[in-house]
Structure formats: C-alpha cells, structure tokens
Amino acid sequence: MADLRLPEFNRRARRQGQPRRKALDLRLALNALSDVVQNRPPPIREFDQIYMKVGDMVVYAEYLCRKLDDRSLVFVGDGDAIGLSIAHLMNEGILDYGPSKLLLLDFDERMVNSVNRFALDNNFADRMEARLYNVADALDPTLLESFDAFHINPPWGQYNDGKSVVSFLRRGAQLLTDQGLGVVAIADDDTKTWPGLVLRMTQKAAIELGMAVVEMQPHMHTYHLEDAPGWHPAR
C-alpha cells in the first residue's frame, strides 16, 4: 500500500525576495499543459467522459491554485487531468502557489496509470498520487476526513436527475476535514431545463451534508463535445 501521508509540495519557485505569487506566464503554462493533454487517454463517451479545452484548463488550474493555496486537495474523478495540470505547473515553477498535496481517485485505470507515469517521468511522483477507485464503493477508511478540499466534475446528471452529481458530492464530503471546501463543476446552459434542475438538486444535497454554497462561477469552461459544441459547465 502506498504511503497515505502524501508529502507536501516543495515550493522551489518561492525564493527570498520574490513576490509570493508571480505573474502567470501564459506561454509557459500552455506549453506545460500541452504535455498533460498529450498524456491524457482518449475519452470514452459512453462513460460521459468529455475533455475541457486547453485554454480553460490553464485558467481553471490557476483559479484552483489561488482558492486552495496550501490546502490538501483530493480529486474524486478527474478526466480533464486538472489535478495533474496543477501538479505540473507547480513543479515547473510556473505557479508558485497552490495545493499542499494532491490525490486523485478515479475509476479509469488508464487515467490512474497515465497520471502516475507522468508524475514519475517528471520527478514529482512523491508529491502527486493517483489511485483506482469507483464512487459506487466505500472509501478507504484511512482517507476519511483527511483533506482540506475536494474537487468533483462528475457525469452531469442529464439522464439520472442529477443523482450522479450527488453521489460524487457525498464521497467528496466524506473526505473533508472540518471547515473544508468543495469545488463542483456541473453543467450550465440557460437554453436547457435540466442543468437548472440538477443545480438545485446539488445545492439541496450540499445543504443536507452541512455545506453552504459560497461562490458560483457561471459559464467558466468549454468542452470538446461533438454533439453539443461550445458547452459551458458551471463550477
């Protein structure tokens, strides 16, 4: 079994006399994330896997690093490889702030293997780990209530009345310490009825879990989706 303590990031980019948060170099960030995208396995549409566009990945990774700076972060599913993007940007010194440690739990063995292989090849396998996990199964008891933040971007619930989103939300909540934060990426389209219904169901479930919705960012991402190009999920 892997070490459950997950050592913290060594912020090598933070040197004496430098500002704590240096400006993001967009060219370096896009080049770094192009490596992550090339490493990502092809999406399986029958599993509702669709991938975020690269420009939005840069913006979103930086946003999460700002919001979750110095917090331990667990991804319950991450087909977009945002967690790996964060780890790579920090390891390369492109971002000098962000989560203190990262763990990915994902049902897709291809994704788990690709993340661990990339981390090993780029010398940060001691700072990011991916493990095989399906939300239908119970969580490893040693992980319960051990993270400062969770992130989910689950199947959006169009055909199951949002139950898929709520299932991932409940698992994320189980992983949180007291005063923890959760980030949920779900569909957002004013021209359709079902995204609003799923959003309300998700908010209701969050309240029942003792959580409060403190921020929403509508129309934050676009995705590669052949049957609905230009879709914007809300976070």
Image (tube, rainbow, N blue to C red):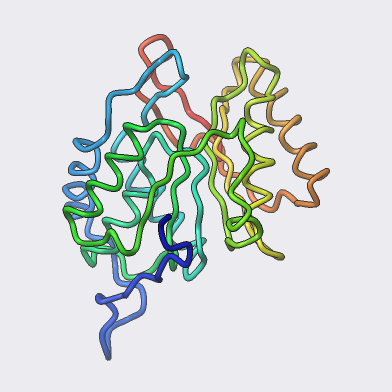
Left or right of 235? Residue 54 is left
Pick the quarter of the image with the N terminus: bottom left
Vertical placement of residue 161 versus 111, above or below: above
Left or right of 27? Residue 65 is right
Image x and y of residue 72, in percent: 51, 64
Image x and y of residue 170, in percent: 69, 41
Judging depth in this view, the residue of 149 and 67 nearest the camera is: 149
Pick the quarter of the image with the C terminus: top right
Q: Residue furthest top?
A: 227
Left or right of 45? Residue 42 is left
Judging depth in this view, the residue of 214 and 37 nearest the camera is: 37
Name the residue located 58 percent from the left edge and 61 percent from the top edge.
Answer: 147
Vertical placement of residue 234 versus 97, above or below: above
Q: Residue furthest front?
A: 1
Name the residue located 66 percent from the left edge and 63 percent from the top edge.
Answer: 177
Vertical placement of residue 114 versus 63, above or below: above
